[in-house]
């Protein structure tokens, strides 16, 4: 049974996503029953994702207590932030007026700050040209295709049905983005270097399920600027991002000055603003900072730290072989020179992507990216062939989500409050319960009526039950590193004090701890704890750091534990985590061999070796237990020594090695130090 659950759709450990609908759950249940013998000797009851199974009788039934919402509750804004939704203070007409003011402001600044000209945008493109954006090239996110007969049809109330012919028909598809089309237009319009265009571009992406920030109907400002080949640099990209970010932060100040009631006075979110400076970080760096988190969880963590980031380098796999931060089309952005602007939305408290942009591919980067995705056949399409023949101008460009920007700056809790999407009836009901006023595309169940008190009570009770069940299942395994205030601190007593003073529901400390030497007689304490969703790691660390015996606390790793894990599985995860950490430290160490030449021939080299290894002991440094004394010339000898710099990151190991060499050269007994070998393993 477990094998079936974890291998559904051929993707290991992806069963929560694969079983998101009632029918798919029933299919899995039926598969389980089909694998069992016709008769079981004992009655076996099994509960799985809202179903009760009697494996003896080969029957399944819906668990009436498990009410599955259309949209997971965690995607909705937290209860504490729902009153801060500006739709509770702005009328529907005022919200539209504010949206218009914002769009006019942004468009004016795009034209003034970037020198762009607004251009008409297509909604339909011809199939098979390579001009449309295929997104991640998956079937679910492929363009919507249709055929235009392109034949004359007699006009009138009653017309003769004409059989379509294939002579003039056009095979078309709905625009998904204008990334490639805009690049063609730069050449068509005769744009000079530094000139460009932007379009208010609507598109349809059928692969998106609607939630607070996603809609199948997409609108964005598509922009493109012509550059020289020499401008294809990360510095040029950062310069453009900085200019665009200035427009966004100025737009926030502008709209709040016009509509101060967007903010709920006294609410914690009323003081939150976008940072004036955006932080640049690479996708690999984000991955390395949070190796145990998923892509969106990593982005949540990084925007929680900085408020707004531009993540550089979207498309290539990570250095450890894991999947890219985001699957990108190989035909428009250079994956080394692209990225996303992501912020933390004040109401949803979740990652909020505003813009995707980059410097466009040239001949070499296109070939590499097509090969990496196994899509070499696309090189024969007319657009890709034009790039390979170097007929298309160099450029940078991207898209700025219009409704995403309005949702952020107008402080709404759902993109459907500033944008007309197509939503399921259950989505309308769930949104209304959360105080979200979706713009309707039709007459819905909530169009003419409000929920009565009984309905609100029932729906809230169901939501609370679901959230309580999910919270009870959520557990996180955390490893922390505690550095004592002095070398005299008794580590076993410190461990007992920490674990005894930090006790609360849901928090469980590991029965043992580990001490590690870091130099100068100081040790570090490595501890492991398991906590639930209601426990705050920040509060736990704050309490530990306030102890007199503690200098600092550092989080080594965090791992979310699925609710199906048994204690035995948890113990195995802990062992594997410790092994991986040890292997990582070993792999990311730097071995350094140096030759130390004394100031005089009378210097006692063994005493010098003892002095060096006894006084130079920074964290992460380990000296070899023996040294070699070798003859140089004229009775001059030198000290050959070896040490290991093991801070875990090659660049930090290199800096540590340089500091060690400088400290040795500063000794009065030393004339010079020569680095003979430096090897990163």
Image: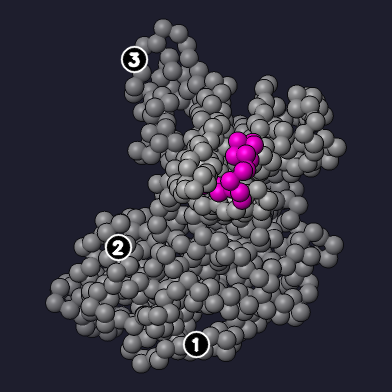
Q: Give percent across and percent down for residue 237.
A: 49, 74
Mark 1 vs mark 3, CA separation in Å: 69 Å
Which mark identifies residue 131? Answer: none
272 falls in the magenta region = no
First along the sequence among labels 1 and 2: 1
Q: Residue at x 67, y 22 (%)?
A: 512
**What residue sits right under mark 3 in the picture?**
37
Instruction: Label 2: state its secondary structure.
Output: helix
**What residue sits right under mark 2 in the picture?**
368
Of tags 1 and 2, the one toward the viewer is 2
**What residue sits right under mark 1 in the picture?**
116
Mark 1 vs mark 2, CA separation in Å: 31 Å
Q: Is residue 289 visible?
A: no
Q: Nearer the viewer, residue 8 or 541?
A: 541
Mark 2 vs mark 3, CA separation in Å: 52 Å
Q: How many marks?
A: 3
Of tags 1 and 3, the one toward the viewer is 1
The magenta span reads 588-610
Q: Give percent across and percent down for residue 567.
A: 58, 21
Q: Is residue 224 above or below residue 594?
A: below
Instruction: Label 1: state its secondary structure.
Output: strand
Q: Residue at x 34, y 15 (%)?
A: 37
């Amino acid at each position: 049974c477990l094998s079936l659950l974890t291998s559904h759709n051929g993707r290991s450990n992806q069963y929560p996503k694969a079983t998101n609908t009632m029918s798919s759950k029933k299919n899995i249940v039926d598969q389980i029953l089909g694998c069992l013998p016709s008769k079981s000797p004992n009655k076996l009851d099994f509960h799985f994702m809202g179903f009760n199974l009697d494996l003896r009788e080969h029957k399944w039934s819906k668990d009436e207590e498990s009410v599955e919402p259309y949209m997971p509750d965690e995607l909705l804004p937290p209860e504490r932030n729902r009153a801060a939704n500006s739709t509770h203070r702005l009328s529907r007409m005022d919200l539209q007026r504010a949206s218009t003011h914002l769009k006019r402001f942004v468009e004016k600044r795009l034209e003034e700050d970037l020198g762009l000209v607004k251009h008409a945008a297509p909604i339909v493109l011809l199939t098979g040209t390579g001009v449309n954006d295929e997104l991640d090239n998956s079937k679910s996110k492929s363009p919507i295709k249709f055929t235009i007969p392109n034949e004359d049809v007699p006009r009138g109330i009653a017309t003769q049905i004409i059989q379509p012919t294939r002579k003039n028909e056009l095979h078309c598809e709905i625009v998904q983005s204008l990334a490639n089309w805009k690049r063609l237009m730069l050449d068509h319009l005769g744009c000079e270097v530094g000139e460009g265009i932007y379009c208010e571009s609507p598109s349809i992406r059928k692969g998106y399920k609607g939630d607070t920030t996603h809609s199948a109907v997409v609108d964005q400002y598509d922009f493109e600027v012509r550059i020289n080949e020499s401008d294809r640099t990360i510095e040029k990209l950062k310069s453009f991002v900085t200019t665009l970010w200035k427009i966004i932060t100025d737009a926030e100040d502008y709209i709040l000055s016009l509509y101060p009631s967007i903010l709920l006075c006294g609410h914690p979110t009323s003081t939150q603003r976008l940072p004036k400076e955006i932080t640049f970080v690479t996708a690999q760096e984000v991955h390395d900072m949070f190796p145990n988190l998923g892509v969106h969880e990593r982005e949540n963590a990084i925007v929680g730290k900085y408020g707004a980031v531009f993540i550089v380098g979207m498309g290539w796999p990570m250095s450890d072989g894991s999947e890219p931060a985001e699957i990108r089309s190989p035909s428009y952005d250079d994956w080394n020179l692209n990225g996303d602007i992501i912020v933390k939305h004040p109401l949803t408290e979740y990652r909020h992507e505003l813009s995707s942009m980059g410097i466009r591919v040239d001949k070499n980067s296109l070939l590499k990216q097509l090969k990496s995705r196994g899509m070499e056949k696309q090189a024969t399409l007319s657009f890709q062939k034009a790039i390979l023949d170097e007929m298309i101008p160099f450029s940078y460009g991207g898209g700025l989500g219009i409704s995403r920007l309005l949702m952020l700056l107008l402080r709404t809790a759902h993109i459907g409050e500033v944008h007309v999407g197509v939503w399921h009836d259950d989505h309308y009901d769930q949104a209304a319960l959360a105080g979200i006023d979706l713009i309707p595309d039709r007459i819905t169940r909530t169009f003419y009526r409000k929920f009565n008190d009984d309905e609100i009570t029932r729906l809230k009770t169901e939501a609370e039950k679901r959230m309580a069940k999910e919270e009870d299942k959520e557990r996180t395994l955390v490893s922390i590193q505690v550095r004592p205030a002095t070398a005299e601190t008794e580590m076993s007593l410190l461990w007992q004090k920490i674990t005894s003073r930090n006790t609360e529901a849901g928090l469980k400390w590991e029965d043992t701890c580990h001490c590690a030497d870091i130099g100068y007689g100081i040790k570090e304490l490595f501890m492991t704890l398991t906590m639930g969703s209601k426990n705050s790691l920040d509060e736990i660390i704050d309490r530990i750091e306030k102890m007199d015996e503690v200098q600092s606390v550092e989080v080594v790793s965090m791992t979310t534990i699925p609710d199906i894990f048994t204690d035995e599985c948890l113990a195995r995860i802990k062992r594997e985590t410790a092994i991986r950490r040890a292997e990582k430290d070993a792999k990311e160490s730097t071995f350094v061999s140096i030759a130390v030449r004394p100031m005089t021939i009378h210097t006692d080299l063994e005493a010098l070796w003892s002095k060096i290894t006894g006084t130079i002991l920074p964290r992460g440094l380990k000296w070899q237990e023996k040294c070699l004394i070798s003859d140089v010339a004229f009775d001059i000898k030198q000290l050959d020594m070896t040490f290991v710099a093991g801070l875990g990151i090659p660049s930090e190991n290199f800096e540590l090695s340089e500091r060690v060499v400088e400290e040795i050269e500063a000794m009065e007994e030393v004339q010079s130090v020569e680095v003979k070998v430096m090897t990163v393993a």
